[in-house]
């Protein structure tokens, strides 16, 4: 297909049923992605589908796919060209099972497989051995959609795909269509009566009136204009628009009292027998009945049926709170959390991360999440529990990464549930409320929280059943999340918003960073990160999230711990965010003279005879050697070579930390010289990637001024730093 050629082009299309002119000069173009067609019954929408598929003869006009004419071709030829069709009426074989239907049409080598179908529509997986005539209307529609997808077509024509589906399945189909539009592997023409779905899955909507395309308009405009919906489609009005007002009382008679309104808010539902009784059952205590009660909240009736279009989803604030966990083992606890959040008036959806394969009542069942694993459901539902949990964690992480409707997220569970939930939570941007109620939250949670802002709440008892303790802890977690979500929704914009920059600092580089911050804080929001391994990862996460305009990486000390095995080590992705961002990078050799350990007795035996410094009772520092400095120079230099934006990396010849100075504990000119020489040997220097030697100690005011000058030059009008020309500073190479 030539570049710019539309996947579907309909020009001056006319079609007759006898003397009835069904299609009257239809013109329609689908360049790529998803296009919705809406209209009243009898307007010609289904006839348009049949004309495209060759099921009805065309009187005049042309239909082409990717530049190839479809006129005169039969339905089989058109299908072989790469057009899949979901007809209105489903047209299934009553005698074939669901599995037989799917395997009959599956084309090997495509992105859609039987396995992926079952992951997308878990209900079909449950009914795989049932015949086509044994399925409900909604299940038949799911099977018809699946049959078309398994052809892995280039263009998919869908006639009323959500007709007859339950709301939860409609949401699954909508999510699938949105994903198809994003993946761009299959383009879709959707004929749809559901205005909400039509507007949500496509940026443009074509309106069909009396056999013609009346107009093609922005889906957001249509979804918000109820008068236009009423005029063109006969929808959009609400019941209260036509409800007569109160009947006046006869003259002289008192007005009838107003009927009391039902109380607003949550309703408690009590079950007198929480467990199935037998003839030997004892009466259930009141406290048990109250403890097993569930909460139902009637959401306020909406007066606006507008559905936000796909084109604006990425820019709006999240609107859904997700409760995540394994419902097969933590069902009552997770539903308890859900009920509290609903009672707060929040829009709540449950995500089931169970790996047992059991049926689920969650809005997002396990198969829907497992479909996001690189190998589909087969990468999750396996016999090995550890591998299954790891597979589901990866699938959930990829599922979360594609959501832009998250207002908050909360999970509850043991070690496995904590891994499942927090792996995905760490993907979310800083600021979105995240709460994890866990049995392991009182220990070292660094591996679960990582660089993210996850709130860990210790469950005290095991998350196993509802009791006097778990109710209090789970309720506290739910209320905390509700408060954060509501506070964030109502938060006023920052009137003093300034571009944010990240700076790395250690105690041994504090004067330098403080001087830089003071010089820049009038123009920039200076975010200082403690270079303790996690601090560096947090800064990199914010850079990857687009929340930092720049990085001033003064303190690269985490590389010391990576090389020598300290406790504040960088990971392999240190500097990765700057590589990916392609923005100007300013760095220095800050505190590359020290490896960190905890109390003196924790220092490894092999290091006991090294130069050690007691920073405080809990932190012991070890001076890096000449060979360690050479290795660090090579490692950092290779990272700098991968950066595509301007680079200025500074070598403070007067010492890299507060205690690397004449007369101080870590003063070692030979080790520093080895570091600088290794960097110079490794870095491929150009006019934009430069190493700059300075005669000053990193904490001297002159060195801080040099950094500020370089920063302002890189983020100002030019790339050549005036700091390069300051007395005593030397640019190496370039």
Image (cartoon, grey):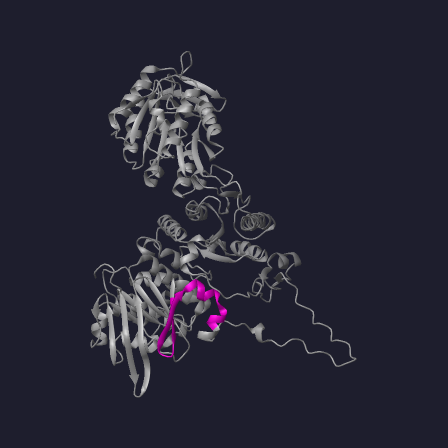
How many numbered dots are placed on residues in this image?
0
Q: Position of residue 200 (x, y in %)?
A: 42, 63
Indicate whether 131 appears above or below 337: below
Residue 489 location (% of width, % of height): 54, 51
Q: Nearer the viewer, residue 598 or 538?
A: 538
Which quadrant of the figure has residue 120?
A: bottom left
The reply, left or right, for residue 2 in relation to residue 355 is left
Q: Which span of residues is magenta-colored?
A: 205-229
Q: Residue furthest front?
A: 717
Residue 347 lies, in percent from the top left, at 52, 58
Relative to 178, 475 lies left or right? right
Q: Quadrant of the N terminus?
A: bottom left
Tell whether 452 sits left or right of 300: left
Q: Is residue 476 visible?
A: yes
Does residue 645 lie above or below 664 as drawn? below
Q: Is residue 211 magenta?
A: yes
Q: Would you place residue 321 above or below residue 453 in this image?
A: below
User: From what the image shows, is residue 52 above or below residue 697?
Assistant: below
Task: In this rendered view, identify the residue nearer to me: 186 or 516.
Answer: 516
């Amino acid at each position: 297909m030539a570049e710019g050629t539309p996947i579907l082009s309909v020009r001056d299309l006319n079609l007759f049923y006898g003397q009835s002119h069904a299609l009257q000069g239809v013109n329609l173009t689908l360049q790529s992605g998803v296009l919705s067609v809406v209209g009243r019954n009898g307007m010609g929408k289904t006839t348009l589908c049949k004309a495209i598929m060759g099921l009805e003869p065309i009187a005049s006009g042309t239909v082409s796919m990717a530049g190839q004419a479809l006129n005169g071709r039969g339905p089989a030829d058109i299908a072989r060209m790469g057009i899949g069709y979901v007809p209105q009426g489903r047209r299934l074989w009553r005698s074939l099972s669901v599995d037989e239907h799917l395997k009959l049409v599956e084309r090997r080598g495509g992105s859609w497989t039987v396995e992926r179908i079952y992951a997308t529509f878990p209900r079909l997986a449950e009914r795989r051995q049932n015949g086509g005539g044994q399925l409900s209307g909604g299940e038949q529609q799911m099977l018809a959609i699946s049959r078309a997808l398994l052809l892995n077509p280039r263009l998919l024509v869908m006639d009323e795909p959500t007709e007859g589906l339950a709301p939860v399945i409609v949401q699954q189909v909508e999510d699938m269509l949105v994903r198809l539009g994003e993946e761009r592997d299959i383009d879709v023409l959707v004929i749809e009566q559901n205005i909400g779905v039509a507007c949500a899955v496509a940026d443009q909507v074509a309106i069909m009136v009396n056999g013609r395309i009346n107009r093609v308009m922005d889906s957001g405009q249509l979804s918000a204009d109820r008068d236009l919906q009423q005029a063109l489609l006969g929808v959009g009005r609400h019941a209260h628009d036509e409800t007569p007002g109160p009947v006046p009382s006869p003259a002289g008679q008192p007005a009838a009292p107003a009927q009391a309104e039902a109380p607003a808010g949550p309703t408690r539902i009590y079950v007198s027998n929480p467990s199935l009784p037998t003839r030997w059952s004892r009466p259930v205590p009141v406290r048990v009945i109250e403890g097993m009660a569930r909460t139902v909240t009637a959401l306020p009736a909406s007066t606006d049926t507008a559905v936000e279009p796909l084109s604006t989803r990425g820019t709006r604030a999240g609107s859904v709170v997700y409760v995540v966990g394994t419902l097969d083992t933590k069902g009552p606890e997770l539903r308890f959390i859900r009920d509290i959040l609903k009672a707060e008036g929040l829009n709540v959806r449950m995500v089931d991360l169970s790996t047992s394969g059991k049926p689920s009542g969650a809005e997002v069942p396990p198969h829907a999440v497992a479909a996001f694993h690189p190998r589909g459901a087969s990468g999750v539902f396996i016999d090995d529990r550890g591998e299954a949990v790891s597979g589901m964690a990866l699938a959930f992480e990829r599922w979360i990464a594609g959501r832009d409707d998250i207002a908050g997220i909360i999970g509850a569970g043991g070690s496995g549930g904590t891994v499942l939930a927090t792996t995905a939570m760490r993907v979310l941007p800083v600021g979105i409320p995240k709460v994890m109620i866990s049995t392991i939250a009182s220990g070292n949670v660094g591996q679960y929280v990582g660089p993210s802002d996850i709130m860990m709440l210790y469950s005290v008892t095991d998350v196993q059943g509802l009791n006097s303790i778990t109710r209090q802890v789970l309720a506290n977690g739910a209320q905390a999340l509700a408060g954060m979500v509501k506070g964030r929704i109502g938060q006023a914009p920052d009137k003093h918003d300034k571009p944010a920059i990240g700076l790395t600092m250690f105690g041994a580089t504090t004067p330098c960073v403080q001087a830089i911050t003071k010089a820049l804080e009038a123009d920039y929001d200076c975010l200082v990160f403690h270079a303790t391994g996690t601090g560096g990862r947090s800064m990199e996460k914010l850079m990857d999230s687009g929340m930092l305009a720049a990085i001033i990486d003064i303190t690269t000390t985490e590389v010391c711990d990576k090389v020598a095995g300290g406790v504040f080590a960088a990971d392999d992705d240190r500097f990765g965010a700057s590589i990916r961002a392609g923005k100007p990078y300013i760095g220095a050799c800050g505190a590359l003279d020290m490896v960190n350990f905890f109390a003196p007795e924790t220092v490894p035996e092999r290091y006991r005879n090294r130069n050690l410094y007691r920073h405080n009772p809990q932190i012991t520092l070890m001076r890096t050697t000449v060979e360690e400095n050479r290795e660090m120079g090579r490692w950092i230099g290779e990272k700098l070579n991968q950066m595509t934006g301007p680079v200025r990396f500074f070598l403070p010849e007067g010492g890299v930390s507060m205690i690397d100075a004449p007369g101080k504990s870590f003063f070692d000119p030979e080790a520093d010289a080895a570091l600088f020489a290794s960097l110079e040997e490794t870095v491929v220097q150009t006019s934009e990637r430069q190493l700059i030697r300075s005669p000053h100690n990193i904490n001297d005011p002159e060195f801080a001024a040099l950094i500020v000058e370089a920063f302002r030059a890189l983020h100002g009008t030019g790339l050549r730093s005036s700091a390069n020309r300051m007395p005593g500073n030397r640019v190496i190479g370039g």
